[in-house]
């Protein structure tokens, strides 16, 4: 008995210096107690709206997750007696995940960024449907982002966002990005690729990565990279040619009404040009241009859209530009030569007169 | 030519109306070049500064178009003046390029490299002035047409496919550059840096040049004025 007491004292003393363990040992209710009820698969609750809330949780669910060493009340710390009388409150992740926490729980500015985001602000306004950490990262089986099974892993995040943004998810799934993602292509953007992860803002918020003046920059992150686009045989010149175009220049100088990438290619429903459903399919181009240029006719589709006067493939435009280039260079040379000759001749003329 | 002019040894080269047209052209071409090149070289920091100075790309476009309309109006006025006015008609006749100008050009070349003894004797307008005049006119007409096409892009696209408008952009930009190069090198040399006029030929402000200059640079005109009793 004395031996046990000594061990216990040591344990508590040690616990005070080993963050994370102290509270586990002192205040947590063992897993077994909770699973007495929650471990039954049929343990669920009928909600007011008629939907069923599954309350089935077992210890296995934490297994393999980042919280595998945690007990129930580490997160559900408002549960102090079993069975609990009131419905436990939603778990607050910032209980541990704050800067300088003793638990050693990972912390970045992402939490703060989230509170500033569209989702965080919606929560603050009292929108109970807006997502909290656990809505995206999962509740019990929280895995690291790099784990392909994680709800926020590259391949899964669209599905996670799609739980709430269903219509957009459906559009995205049919798009070139969505179908590529389904094929397991790692380079393709899912939701977070364009919208950001925690810093998600409404599209009409200037802070947003997809604000009208930021869209082209966002798309060009990948589409100007030869190393990424080369793999799929996609040209990178679209970025440069857009920047050179009237649309691109106006956009760079802050015009918000001028066309950016998504004005023509679509937002979530981007499809390759040979797809008849694509907004940039030659058949659909007049309609797409017509959104801003009323009365757009099939003439809008005749000629390359992303045209680069410096490339031979641009045909007559390249040859005209080249002609003018050499005409200008030739004229300059001829004029300079003429000026020097004229000066030379005139000097002799003056000498002769003297 | 007044008595005072004659006593000062000066002859009129540009009448008031021509000076007004020339001054308008000077100012408008400068505005068009500054606003145009700012767009053409928008990645340059100086160009970006100019665009911001103009109040953004939208306002830049307005400035450019206002100057363009005034320049085109100036050109139209000039064409009518040259074709139908009492002063313009003889001027136009003297500006027409003939066989003599080509001969003059080659003779001046030969003289300059030392194989001809005589420097060509020019009338009121030598081949240098004629090249400048017709070059500028052709350039302004071409750049005006492409400019209007691009301005009224919705209207243009009713008749032309997109590729023609892309072509118009290329021509408009390069034509501007070519015009600028010619203006800069040629006009600057002929009316500013040329030893006979340095620092500048005053006729664009006063309308007058010295009869001595006329005798040296435009001897045929000088002789004509003398024959007609103006000198």
Image (spheres, rainbow, N blue to C red):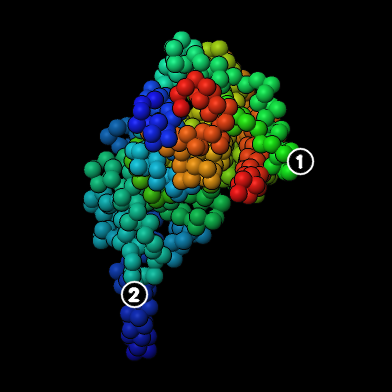
Q: Is residue A198 visible?
A: yes
Q: Are the two marked residues, 1 and 2, in contact with CB atoms closer than 8 angstroms?
A: no
Please provide percent x and percent y for residue B120: 65, 32
Please provide percent x and percent y for residue B167: 60, 26
Which residue is at 50% across, 37% downward?
B212
The residue carrying mark 1 is B115
Tell me the distance, in whole angstroms, between the alpha carbons under discs 1 and 2. 106 Å
Which residue is at 62% across, 27% downward?
A304
Disc 1 on helix, strand or loop? loop
User: Share a chain, discs 1 and 2?
Assistant: no
- Observer-nearest of A142 and B19: B19
Q: Is residue A304 above or below residue A74?
A: above
The residue carrying mark 2 is A22
Q: Which chain letter matches label 2?
A: A
Please provide percent x and percent y for residue A298: 57, 15
Q: Is residue A168 above or below residue A146?
A: above
- How many numbered discs sit on the rendered protein? 2
- Observer-nearest of A217 and B13: B13
């Amino acid at each position: 008995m004395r031996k046990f007491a000594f061990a216990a004292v040591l344990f508590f003393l040690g616990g005070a210096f080993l963050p994370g363990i102290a509270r586990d040992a002192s205040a947590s209710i063992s897993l077994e107690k909770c699973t007495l009820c929650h471990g039954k698969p049929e343990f669920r609750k009928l909600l007011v709206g008629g939907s069923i809330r599954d309350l089935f949780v077992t210890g296995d669910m934490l297994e393999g997750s980042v919280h595998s060493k945690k007990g129930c009340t580490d997160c559900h710390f408002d549960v102090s007696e079993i069975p609990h009388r009131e419905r436990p409150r939603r778990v607050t992740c910032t209980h541990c995940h704050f800067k300088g926490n003793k638990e050693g729980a990972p912390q970045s500015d992402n939490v703060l960024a989230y509170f500033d985001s569209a989702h965080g602000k919606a929560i603050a306004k009292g929108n109970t449907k807006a997502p909290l950490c656990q809505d995206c990262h999962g509740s019990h089986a929280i895995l690291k982002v790099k784990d392909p099974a994680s709800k926020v892993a590259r391949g899964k995040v669209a599905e996670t966002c799609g739980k709430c943004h269903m219509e957009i998810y459906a559009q995205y799934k049919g798009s070139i990005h969505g179908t590529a993602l389904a094929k397991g292509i790692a380079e393709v953007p899912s939701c977070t690729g364009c919208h950001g992860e925690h810093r998600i803002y409404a599209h009409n918020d200037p802070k947003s990565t997809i604000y009208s003046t930021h869209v082209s920059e966002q798309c060009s992150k990948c589409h100007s990279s030869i190393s990424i686009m080369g793999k799929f045989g996609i040209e990178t010149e679209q970025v440069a040619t857009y920047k050179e175009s009237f649309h691109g220049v106006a956009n760079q100088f802050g015009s918000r009404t001028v066309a950016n990438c998504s004005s023509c290619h679509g937002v979530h429903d981007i499809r390759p040009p040979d797809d008849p459903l694509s907004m940039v399919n030659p058949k659909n181009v007049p309609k797409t241009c017509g959104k801003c240029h009323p009365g757009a006719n099939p003439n809008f589709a005749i000629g390359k859209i992303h045209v680069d006067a410096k490339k031979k493939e641009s045909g007559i435009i390249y040859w005209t530009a080249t002609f003018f280039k050499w005409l200008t260079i030739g004229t300059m040379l001829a004029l300079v030569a003429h000026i020097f000759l004229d000066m030379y001749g005139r000097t002799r003329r003056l000498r002769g007169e003297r | 030519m007044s008595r005072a002019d004659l006593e000062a040894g000066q002859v009129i080269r540009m009448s008031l109306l021509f000076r007004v047209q020339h001054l308008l052209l000077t100012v408008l071409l400068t505005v068009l070049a500054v606003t145009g090149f700012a767009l053409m070289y928008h990645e340059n920091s100086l160009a970006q500064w100019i665009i911001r100075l103009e109040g953004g790309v939208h306002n830049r476009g307005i400035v450019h178009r206002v100057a363009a309309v005034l320049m085109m109006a100036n050109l139209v006025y000039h064409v009518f003046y040259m074709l139908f006015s009492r002063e313009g008609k003889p001027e136009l006749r003297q500006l027409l390029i003939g066989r003599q100008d080509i001969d003059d050009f080659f003779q001046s070349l030969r003289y300059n490299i030392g194989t001809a003894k005589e420097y060509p004797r020019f009338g009121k307008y030598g081949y240098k002035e004629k090249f400048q005049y017709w070059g500028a006119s052709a350039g302004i007409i071409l750049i005006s047409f492409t400019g209007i096409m691009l301005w009224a892009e919705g209207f243009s696209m009713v008749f032309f496919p997109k590729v023609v408008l892309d072509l118009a952009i290329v021509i408009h930009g390069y034509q501007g550059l070519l015009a600028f190069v010619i203006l800069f090198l040629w006009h600057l040399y002929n009316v500013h840096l040329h030893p006979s006029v340095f620092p500048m030929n005053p006729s664009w402000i006063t309308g007058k040049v010295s009869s001595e200059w006329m005798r040296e640079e435009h001897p045929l005109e000088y002789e004509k004025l003398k024959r007609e009793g103006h000198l």
